[in-house]
Image (cartoon, helix red, strand yellow):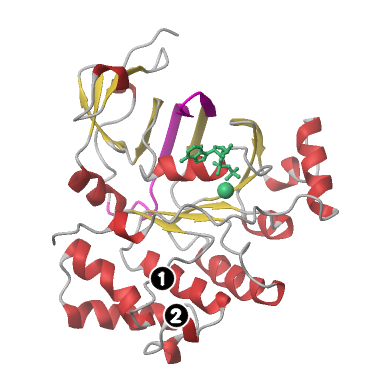
Amino acid sequence: MNLLTLLRRPDRDARAQNRYPAGRSADAAPDRAGTDPASPRGGQVEIRGVHKSFGDLEVLRGIDLSISPGSVTAILGPSGSGKSTLLRTINHLEPLTRGLISVDGEVIGYRRDGDLLHELHERQVLRQRAAIGMVFQSFNLFAHMTALANVAEAPRRALGVPRREAEARARELLDLVGLAEKAEVYPRQLSGGQQQRVAIARALALDPKVLLFDEPTSALDPELVEEVLAVIRSLARAGTTLVIVTHEVPFARDIADTVVFMDHGRIVEQGPPAEVLDHPRHERTRAFLHRVRTGLEASPSVPDAPTDLPHHLPEDH
Ligand SMILES: Nc1ncnc2c1ncn2[C@@H]1O[C@H](COP(=O)(O)OP(=O)(O)O)[C@@H](O)[C@H]1O
Ligand SMILES: [Mg+2]
C-alpha cells in the first residue's frame, strides 16, 4: 500500500496536506450516488484509512468501516477512544488528517482533483451535511424556539422549504416521536427525554440518508432513557442508515446489525451483536463489557462539543 492522495484545505498552507493510505487512490470509490429508485434511502458509508490528530494527539489511528444502506451500527468503547471524533468526521464536523469518507460514493468534505483531495468550502459541506443528520448527547435545541420551530428551521433555512410546508412536516415528525401535543412549547418546558425526541425529529426533518447518534441517552435521567431508545428503535430499518454510539449494551444487542468496539482510536473488533457482545474475541472488549455491566464504565460527564445546528445551517440564507 503506498499512498496516493493528498488532502489540502482550501485556504490553508501546504502543511495541511496529508497522504492518503496506499492502495486506495481516491478513484477507488465509486463516483456516482445511488440513483436507483428501488434502492433504499439509506446511505452507504465507506470509511477508509481514517486518521485524525489534534496536535500531537492521534485520536483516530486508521479506521476502516463499511456501513450498508439502511443498516444499524452500534459503536461501543471506553471514554476517550475516539467514538465522538469518528462520528464527527462522518459529517465533516472534523476534517480528516488522512483517509477518506464517502456516502453513496460522494466524498465527504473534500473534492477530488486527480490524486489530490481539496477541502470543500463551507457552503458545499453544509449541503452534504443536510444528508447526514446528527443527534447529540446534550440535545442542543434552540432555547428561544418552540419545538415546532426547532424542527421546521433546518428545512426552511438549509433547503428553502416554504414555512407552511416545513411546519406541516415538522408536525408529522413530532407526532412520530410522540410529541404532537408539545409543538408549541419551548425546550425548557420539556423533560430531557422529550427534548432529545425533538432533537431526533429535527434531525429527521432534512430527510437524511444517514443519522448519527452520539450517546443520545447518556445525559438523561434513567427513567427517561427508554422513551428515547424506543424512538430510535422505531427508526431502525425504516430506510435511513443509523450509526449509534451508545453504552446501552442490551439496546445495541437488540437493534444493531453490526457492533463495533473501539479502543485507543482503532476498531478492535466488529461483527454481529451475538459475536461481539456475547463472544468477544479480544480481551479489551471483554474487559470493557465487564466494566459496563458492573457500572464502572460511566458515560463522560462532559457534554459533547457545542457544535451542531449552526454548522448545519448557512448563516446567510
Ligand atoms: N477538539 C479537540 N481538541 C483536542 N482534543 C480533542 C478534541 N476532541 C476530542 N479530543 C480528544 O480526543 C480523544 C477522543 O475523544 P472522543 O472522540 O470525544 O472520545 P469518545 O467519544 O470515545 O469518548 C480524547 O482524548 C479527547 O480529549
Ligand atoms: Mg464521546
Give the secondary structure at mark 2. Answer: helix
Label 1 CB-ligand 2 distance < 8 A: no
The amino acid marked with disc number 2 is Pro
Q: Earlier in the sequence, mark 2 or mark 1?
A: 1
* Relative horizontal placement of residue 68, taking residue 83 as reference (left or right): left
Residue beneath label 1, please? 141
Rendered residue at 50%/23% (across/down):
56
* Rendered image quadrant of residue 153: bottom left
Task: Check whether the beta carbons of the residues at disc 2 and disc 1 lie within 8 A of each other.
Answer: yes
Rendered position, 200 above or below 295:
below
Residue 150 screen position, x and y as percent? 34, 75
Residue 79 screen position, x and y as percent? 66, 44
Q: Is residue 140 magenta?
A: no
**Would you say the magenta stretch is mainly helix, strand or loop?**
strand
Residue nearest the observer in this picture, 102 or 160? 160
Residue 114 screen position, x and y as percent? 20, 18
Residue at the top extreme of this rendering: 2
Rendered residue at 17%/71% (across/down):
161
Give the secondary structure at mark 1. Answer: loop
The amino acid marked with disc number 1 is Leu
Rendered residue at 25%/45% (across/down):
125
* Relative horizontal placement of residue 4, taking residue 262 as reference (left or right): left
- Range drawn in magenta: 37-61
